[in-house]
Amino acid sequence: DVNGPCYIRFAREATPIVTHESDPLTFGKANVVRYRGETERFIDAFEVIAADEYQNEREDIAIISNGPELAESMRAAWILKEEFGIETRVLNLHTIKPLDVKAVHAAGRECVNVLTAEEHQVGGLGNLIAATLLQASIGKPLIFDMIGVQDTFGASGAPWELVRAFGLSAEYIAGKACELIARRVRRADDMPA
């Protein structure tokens, strides 16, 4: 139904199926993915809600991702909750253009800690989200960082070996999320009374 050019990017390797056919999918509208507790099947441990229908649950951090990094971001949300008691809002930006600006602004305003996760050179998705957040009137300090391949040359290997080698797996995302939350706590401790 799109009148004009489109770009769809597919990973070469098999990736986990992390959505149900019944999940909302609207062009240009992000989805919020929330970990709800361990289940037999990983996919069933998450609830997917259209971002424009989502009610703030006061999560500690928002992880914004898409594509193959969505599954890693979901695994990170599981690690953060099960190992550290940290609530995470995963924002699935399945459509980059048009960007769901309202969903990105809400994540920044409501979560205060924002982390992007992309599976290529850091800065594509991250820079887009950073600029979008800077244009918003958040009204309070925001802690922000990006997960992605650092400024380095590529390497050869199996896809999942490269995800780990470049620090793109759930464990790295969860570790960076913990760093952001700790940074927020330190900043609050340093503020005058």
Image: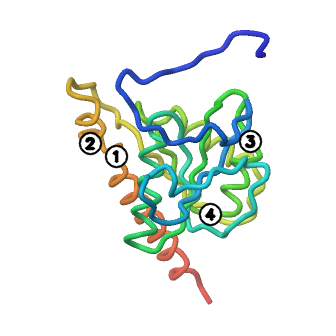
Labelled disc at residue 148: none
Q: In the picture, residue 76 is in which quadrant?
A: bottom left
Within 10 angstroms of label 2, few (less than 14), some, or many (20 or more) residues?
few
Q: Secondary structure at mark 3?
A: helix
Within 10 angstroms of label 3, few (less than 14), some, or many (20 or more) residues?
some
Q: Secondary structure at mark 1?
A: loop
Write down the residue under mark 2. 164
Write down the residue under mark 4. 112
**CB atoms at circles 2 and 4 under 8 Å apart?**
no
Mark 4: which amino acid? Answer: Val
Q: Position of residue 181 (x, y in %)?
A: 48, 68
**CB atoms at circles 1 and 2 under 8 Å apart?**
yes
Within 10 angstroms of label 1, few (less than 14), some, or many (20 or more) residues?
many
Residue displayed at 49% across by 51% down:
145
The extreme top residue here reads 4
Q: Earlier in the sequence, mark 4 or mark 3?
A: 3
Q: Secondary structure at mark 4?
A: loop
Q: CA distance from mark 1 to mark 3?
A: 26 Å
